[in-house]
Amino acid sequence: PVVYPLIGLCLVWGFYLFFRYRGFHMLSQLLHQKRFPIFEMTVAVLTIAFSPIAEKDYLHIFGVRCELMEEILELISYLGLFITQLDIFMETRRKENN
């Protein structure tokens, strides 16, 4: 019974921090300057979308077990999100130093 309220609290806190520290402004600047890591974000979104498909035994690629395929897709999505955050962090750090 505690899990969903904690998830909601984390989401509200994340949105608060995003708007408090002008995250939307930084994202719009990155998009305007064509420096947003679109490829990494696209990979993350696509693998997140295909992960439930692999979990339901609908996706058989090269004879790989579906549980393994799901875990591989989740790993790729986490890596894509991590690299996206790292790219944005490095870009903002570069701007601060100039």
Image (tube, rainbow, N blue to C red):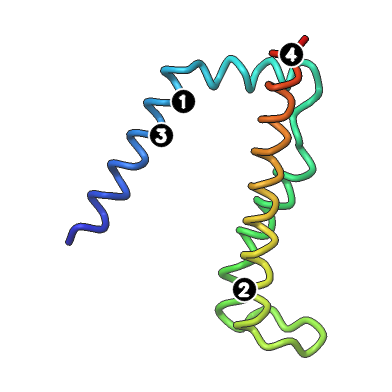
Q: Quadrant of the C terminus?
A: top right
User: Which secondary structure, mark 4?
Assistant: helix
User: Dot 3 surroundings within 10 Å: few (below 14), some, or many (20 or more)?
Assistant: few
User: Dot 1 surroundings within 10 Å: few (below 14), some, or many (20 or more)?
Assistant: few
Q: Is residue 51 left or right of residue 11?
A: right
In the foreground, 58 or 18? 18
List x then y, in percent, for residue 56. Answer: 56, 79
Residue ID for mark 3: 14
Do callouts 3 and 1 mark residues in contact (Cβ within 8 Å)?
yes
Which label was assigned to residue 82?
none
Q: Amino acid at mark 1?
A: Phe
Residue ID for mark 2: 71
Which label was assigned to residue 97?
4
Q: Amino acid at mark 2?
A: Glu
Q: Quadrant of the N terminus?
A: bottom left
Q: Residues under labels 3 and 2: Cα distance?
A: 26 Å
* Among the two numbered marks 2 and 1 on one chain, the one whose residue lies closer to the N terminus: 1
Q: Residues under labels 2 and 4: Cα distance?
A: 39 Å
Residue ID for mark 1: 18
Q: Is residue 74 above or below residue 41?
A: below
